[in-house]
Every structure is written in structure tokens, then in C-alpha cells.
Amino acid sequence: MEVEILARIQFAFTIAFHYIYPPLSIGLGLIMVIMEGLYLKTHNKIYEKMARFWTRIFALTFGIGVATGIVMEFEFGTNWATYSKFVGDVFGSALAAEGIFAFALESGFLGILLFGWNRVSKMVHFIATLGVWLGSMFSAVWIVVANSWQQTPAGYHIVGTGMAARAEITDFWAMVFNPSSVDRLLHVWVGAILAGAFLVLSVHAYYLIRNRYVELSQKAFKIALVVAAVFSFSQLLTGHKAAIGVAENQPAKLAAFEGHFYSLAVADMYLFGWVDKENQKVSGPKIPGGLSFLTSFDFKTPLKGINYFPVDEQVPQVNAVFQFYHIMITLGMTMIGLTLLACWLWFRKKLFRYQWLLWLFVFAVFLPQIANQVGWFAAEMGRQPWVVYGLLRTSDAFSKSVHANEIVFSLIMFAFIYVLLFTLFIYLLDRKIKHGPYDESEEEDRPLQREIAEILEHR
Amino acid sequence: MEFLHDIDYPTVWFLVVGALFSGYVILDGFDLGAGAWHLFFRTEESRRIALNAIGPVWDGNEVWLVIGGGALFAGFPILYASLFSAMYIPFMLFLAFLIFRAVSIEFRSKEPMLWWRKLWDICYSVSSAMLAFLLGVVLGNVLQGIAIDKDFEYQGSWLEFLNPYAIMVGFTSLALFMVHGAIYLAMKTEGRLFIKITTLLRRAILIFVAIFILTTGYTLLYIPHLSDHLLSNPVLFIVPVLAFLSIANIPRLVSKSRYLHAFLFSSLTMSLLLILVAIEIYPVMLPSTIDPAYSITVFNAASSVKSLQTMLIIVLIGGPLVAFYTFFVYKTFRGKVRLDDTSY
């Protein structure tokens, strides 16, 4: 038990930390592609400045993403040996495809993206940026496919028995397109794009508040706002689609999402609440029959509740799963509201008039980040007690030959390294933001920012 | 069992994994080696040039580790699980140094303060050297065998990885990487740094040869199972002979200042030594010191033929693509290092 819980804490900690960065790479990648595309189309230097500025921040997130990502691959073997033996045959191929199709594309072109500005033509550089972005998108494909297979296994058969049992692939495409992979992939992609878009919004809102780089920041803010608005709304659809998938394929997880205890009863939907597992009660404002309605468009449909399942197949941490799921939804709705408000003000030509709106956007950078984190917490904790749904229990999956004190050592090591890494990341991000899109030598050539701001204000 | 042109799939995949690891040590080998030399350069300019010599490519090189690791996981899940959980501490240290190294490269140039740069220089150089060393340590343990039982579970203690033979192989790989890295730097630099690195290179070759002979001697004397295959099939002696010739060719080319050729030969040396390792242990991949019957082999650790076939298709499609853009990147950044506003 001790080894299991330590291994779980370490994996949860290292993957949660890792997951700050790849979504930023995916999201910033898209924004950089748009910026460079506009530069190619309009030849306006301002778009090049923007793209170069965001490339520098991208480099920071990408570097940390790679370094913390290799940790995940290794931990499968070091801490989850039984799990690796069980799944290796099946999603070995997904991981191999990730490495060779996605990650290599991404890292190969990264050199040109970062260091090639003065060495290759604009068009080749644009292609490199596109390659890096597509690489990061493909990367998500294979990782989400592998994870989705753990949620809804397909295209395999079981060989061997007891602790030697393992899944063998029988149909590659059935494994790739397992029942949850497409829904979850879209949901993950959109979440990642939102993380990048909201970072761009945040930084340029900050510049606008400080009256720095006003012209550039207004253009960049609008680009990111369009992306954020479109994808915030899309996330509602992908989220809904994913939830219907959960209802079909992982009813125990759906029951935990809403704290729905009674077997085959109409299920309610809560705005927020608190789950009392002992008394099987949830307190909070609810829409009666809401969950039933969402899954079938009928308030009367009975759904399988937590008690429908044997005790050893119920989600152990119902309240935590409930909370994470609801935080994710609340944050998603907030993003939709915020971007709609900004778009409406833009339509009324008042987008940059209100300081409070800009301040909201400065802090809104945390919304998609927290939503991404808690969304994964809900997805992974909602799968418990299974590591591979219905096939392999988490309590059977860890490495038997690793001792608790070894994991304590590595856990302390990772905690130390990641705290240091995060501090440096924030420090350097801050430096880069304060430095801004222009080099010092160019600073003098430009007219005063405040004057431009005033001219624009009175236009 | 199914075959692909007379070779069974697990063996094909063993060769694929071998080729990927070979690609990894050749590519990441030179940037780890270059990193290990870093503190030998005294001036800020030299250090910047040395760092930027690997600047645009080190990240791409590390991808080969991810792919190689993925291929091992996919092709031989049982080996992956047993080896990684048995070598828990070295792999965790490996990860720590890998992160420190990446961070040092990224962060060093972000501040101009002397103490900042010195700190990251030390961090970068030490972690590069330790990574090269740890790779050798793990290889040493694999060659020698570890205490795995009939369920392929490790039964040894957590400190056993640090045995004399593993340490020797660790130093061998560090020395080889440093020779390789020095040749790369000689190829990419000019002026003061070039003069410095060529002097260091000559010494490094001597040190490598000395360590290599020592390790080979130890292997022949104390780990007899590693020479069984060669003795029973003398034709295979061609591989160690070629490896020795390839090593001997390096100082010859260096003395003629033909660094590109020297680099090709140090790459060849690395490949030949890995082929030698493969010949020595195949079909075993991880010998058991408890009972040879418990050893993990290509056959008892492999994924299903279906899985191996699928991945072979993936590699056959993806491999040329990777080769293409690796080539393109190296072509873009060919020639001696020039520092500009995008440099580290």
C-alpha cells in the first residue's frame, strides 16, 4: 500500500507539472502560425515582431515540456512495471508513433524555428513553425490515444493469467479509434489551444494596461481573442460529446462526476455541491434530472448510480472527482462568458476602453490552466480503482521490486527540481515579458507609446 | 513463429532498437561529450561558441532517446519493466541530470551576471558528464547481468548498480563521448577554442584507449560469458577487429586535421561497439545472475508479432521522414558556429 500510494503521488505530481507546458506549446504554436501567416500575407513587420516575441516564450515552455516529458516515459518502467508489461504490446505502437511522427517533427524543426530567423527564407521559416505546431498536435494524438485505451480498451485480447496476464493488440485501428479517443482528443486539443490563447491575451492585456507596445498588443490581443472565443465555445461541444461517451462507456465514472448514488434512478445535475459519501447525499443547488437530460435529452431517463457497481469497482474518491469535474465546468463557462463579453465590446468598438476588462484578462491566464489540470484529475481519478478500465487495477500495477524509500528519495528529488524549475520559469517568463517584443536598440526609433495610445483612443 | 526474410520478428525488432540506440549515442553522444568539456574552456566567448555549436541540434538529438526508449517499451515490455524498475536509482538520477542539463542550456544565456553563467556552466558540464557516465553504468549492469528471479522481478539491493565493472563501463562511455564531442567541436569552431579543443582531443584519445583496453581486459577475465559467442563463432571476430581499426583510425585522421572523417569514424566506432555488445549477449537482453534460465531474452520479452509488425510499418514510414529533417536541420546550420541575436 505504501509503495502504491507513493508511486501514485509521484506520477500525479510529475504529470501534473508536465501538463503545464505541452498545452502551452500547442496553443502558442497555433497563435505563432497565425501571426507568421499574417506576416507572410501582409508583409507588416509588426506581425514578425509578435511572432518572434512569442517564439522566445514558446522556447521556454517547449524546453521544460521536453525535459519533464521524458520523465513520464521512464516512470512507466521504473514505477509501473506490471502496468508496462500489461499495456506494452498495445500502446507501445502508439508511443512509437508519437516519438517518430510527432516528437521528431516537432524537435527537428524547432532548431529552425528558434535559430533560423536569419538563415532561411520567410516561407521556409513559416513551414518550420507550422511543422513544430503540427508536431505538437500529433503528439497529443498518440498520447491521448494511449490514455483513452486505458479508459475504453478496444482492439486487444488478454493473454496469460494472474500477474502474468497482458493485453495483446489484435486490431491497430480499433485500438487507435477506441470508443473514447476521438472525443477526448478534441477536448484535449481545445483545452491546450485555450491555454496558449489566454497566455497571449494575458500578456498583451498587461502591455495595454501599461501603455506599452500599444499598436502591436492591440493586434495580438485581437488575434488571441478570436482564437479564445471560438475555442471556448467549441469546448462546450467537445466536453458534452466526451461526457456522453463517459455515460456510455464508463458509467461508474459519470456517476462519480455528479455524485449520483442510486442505481438506475433519474440523475440530477449540480451547479456546485459537496458529496457526503457516508450518507450518500449531495448538498448543493441542482437541476433535477439534469444529468439524465444531458445524456439522453430526457429528464426521466434512469442512469446507473454508484451503488449499481460492486463496492470494489466503485470510484473511491467521489467527492474529489465531483469537485474537480465541477471546477472544470465552472471555469469553462467563465471562459465562454469572458470572451463573449470581450467580443461584444469589440463589436461596439469599446474593446480597449475598460481597464477592468484588461485586468480580468491578465488573470484569466489561470482559467484554462486550472481547468486542464482538474479535468485530468477528474478523468484519471474517475477511472479508479482501475488503471486500465475493467482490466487492471492500480493496486496491481506498480513495480514490486522498488522499495518505498527509493520512491521517497525520487519524490523529494522531483519536488526539489520542479520547484526550482517552476521558480526559474516564472522568473524568466517575467523577464521576457518585461523585455517585450522589441530589442533595446530598436526602442529609441519608435515614437512614444503613450502618444500612440492617445491617438488611438481619440480616433 | 513468423519470419521476415528468415529472421523472426523479435530479432528484427532487436535490430531496430539497436539501430535507434546507435543513432542516439552517435547524435546525443557528441553533444553530451561537448558538454562534458565545457568547463575546460575558460573564456565567456569560448563557452558561448561551444554551447551554440550544439545549440540548434541537441534537442533533436534527445528525441532519439525518446524514440529508442519508446521502441524498447513497445517491442520488449518485459525488459523495459524489469530493467527500469531494477535500475531505479540510476534512472532517476539520469532524469535529474537530463532536466538540469536542458535547464542549464536554456537559462544560462538569459542573464548576463557572471555568477549566474558560472553556476549554469557547472551545472551543464557536470550533468552532461554524468549522463554519459550513467549510460555506461546501465550498459555495464546489462552486460554483467542483474539479480532477476523467474518472474523477471529484481531481487537485488538498490545500490548494487554501482559495482566495479559498471563504473568501468561508465568511464569508458564518458571517455568515448568526450572524444566524439571534441571532434565535433573541432569541426564546428575556429580560433582559440579550436586550438584548445584539438589539444584536449589528442589527450582524450589516449585516455580513452587506455580505459578501453582496461575494460576489455576486465571483461575477458571476469565476465567470461561475454566472449562465448565470439569463441564459438570466430567469424564474428571481424567486429572487434573492425572496432579496433576504427578507433586506431581516429588519431590518424585527427593528426591530418580531417575532422569530418574523424567524426565519421568515431560514430562508426560507437556503432561497432554496440554491435559487439549485441553479438555478445543475443538472444539474451538481460542476463539473470540468480539462474541463467531466468534471463530475459529477445523471445520471452517480445511483444506479439502483430504488434511488432505494426511498429515496423510505423518505423519504415517515419524513419525516412526523421532522416530527412535531421539532414535538413544539419544542412541549415552547417559550417563553423556564428553567433547572432538568436544564439544562446
Image (cartoon, grey):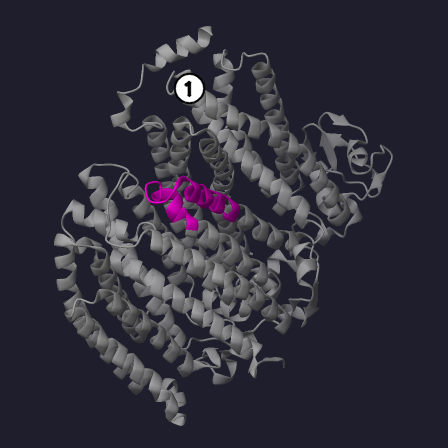
Which quadrant of the structure image shows residue B221? bottom left
Residue B235 screen position, x and y as percent: 38, 91
Q: Secondary structure at mark 1?
A: helix
Point 64% across, 55% down: residue: A150
Relative to the observer, which residue lies in front, A195 or A251? A195
* B203 with respect to B331 (left or right): left
Q: Is residue A400 visible?
A: no
Query: Magenta segment range?
Result: A109-135
Name, please, the residue furthest toward the top.
A458
In the rendered image, the vertical position of residue A396 relative to residue A413, given as above or below = below
Give how far across and how far down residue A240 sits, in percent: 71, 37
Q: Foreground: A327 or B5? A: B5
Quadrant hosting residue A36 = top left
What residue did someone put label 1 on? A215
Q: Is residue B270 magenta?
A: no
Q: Residue at x 36, y 65 (%)?
A: B25
Q: Is residue A333 left or right of residue B55?
A: right
Task: List x then y, in percent, for residue A408.
Answer: 43, 53
Mark 1 residue crowding within 10 angstroms, few (<14) / some (14–19) / many (20+): some
The answer to whether one can see residue A367 in this image is yes
Quadrant that contains the N terminus of chain A: bottom right
Rendered view: B274 above or below A132: below
The residue under the point 36% across, 67% down is B159
* Chain of the residue on which disc 1 is drawn: A
Above-or-below relation of B171 to B336: below
Q: Residue at x 42, y 19 (%)?
A: A215
* Circle count: 1
Magenta stretch: dominant secondary structure = helix
The amino acid beneath tag 1 is: Glu
Residue closer to the observer: A167 or B306: B306
